[in-house]
């Protein structure tokens, strides 16, 4: 019963800001609630506070004992929803499929796939040496096992 109430309050809180969306919602046997959100323009601390309050302020602590953690999807967290790719156009991604691993700049998002581009050094077709070539790969969302943004420091 508490889980359904929390889920309902969470959905209401997210509806108040359409740029935010749910990545993960779990609730342990000890009523520990864990919520991970993301946003089309990222997530601020105030966004997490707003979602936390939407849940916490509407549950009677006298009736239910619970702990609540609302967090944003971290910068190094894998991309798990197609919607997360939108804010990462132009950034370098590492994408794994069953057969391959690609590392390239996210150039485009289509209905069911993404397009990555990168430069690679390959042997010249004729003669000795190597030449830099532009590579491009379209990867279906259904083929992606894991995708994450490559962070540079």
Image: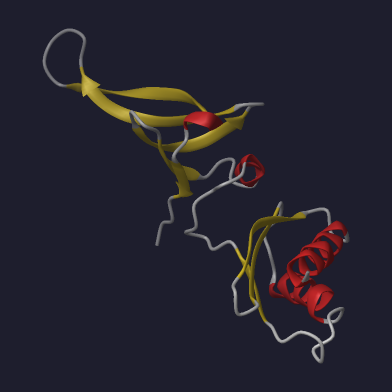
Whether residue 115 is visible to the viewer of this picture, yes or no, is no
Outermost residue toward the bottom in this view:
62
Q: In the drawing, does residue 118 fall left or right of residue 22?
A: left
Q: Quadrant of residue 112?
A: top right
Whether residue 120 is visible to the viewer of this picture, yes or no, is yes
Tell me which residue sits at (86%, 62%) in the image. 12
Given residues 93 and 10, the one toward you in this image is 10
Q: How far across and down, in percent of the image, does residue 110 sit?
A: 64, 26
Q: From the image, which quarter does the C terminus lie in? A: bottom left
Q: How far across and down, in percent of the image, does residue 96 sit?
A: 39, 38
Look at the picture and state if 69 lies above or below 107.
below
Tell me which residue sits at (70%, 69%) in the image. 44
Q: In the drawing, does residue 98 fall left or right of residue 83?
A: left
Given residues 1 and 77, the one toward you in this image is 1
Q: How far across and down, in percent of the image, does residue 98 sit?
A: 36, 32
Q: In the drawing, does residue 83 fall left or right of residue 49?
A: left
Tell me which residue sits at (54%, 48%) in the image. 79
Q: From the image, which quarter does the N terminus lie in? A: bottom right
């Amino acid at each position: 019963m508490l889980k359904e109430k929390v889920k309902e309050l969470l959905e209401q809180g997210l509806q108040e800001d359409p740029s935010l969306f749910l990545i993960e919602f779990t609730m342990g046997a000890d009523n520990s609630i864990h919520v991970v959100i993301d946003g089309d323009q990222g997530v601020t601390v105030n966004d997490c506070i707003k979602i936390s309050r939407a849940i916490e302020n509407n549950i009677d602590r006298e009736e239910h004992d619970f702990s609540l953690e609302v967090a944003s999807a971290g910068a190094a967290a894998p991309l798990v929803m197609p919607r997360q790719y939108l804010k990462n156009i132009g950034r370098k991604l590492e994408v794994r499929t069953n057969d391959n691993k690609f590392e390239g700049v996210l150039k485009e998002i289509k209905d069911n796939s993404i397009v990555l581009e990168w430069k690679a050094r390959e042997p010249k077709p004729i003669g000795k040496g190597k030449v830099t070539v532009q590579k491009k790969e379209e990867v279906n969302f259904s083929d992606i096992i894991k995708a994450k943004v490559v962070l540079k420091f």
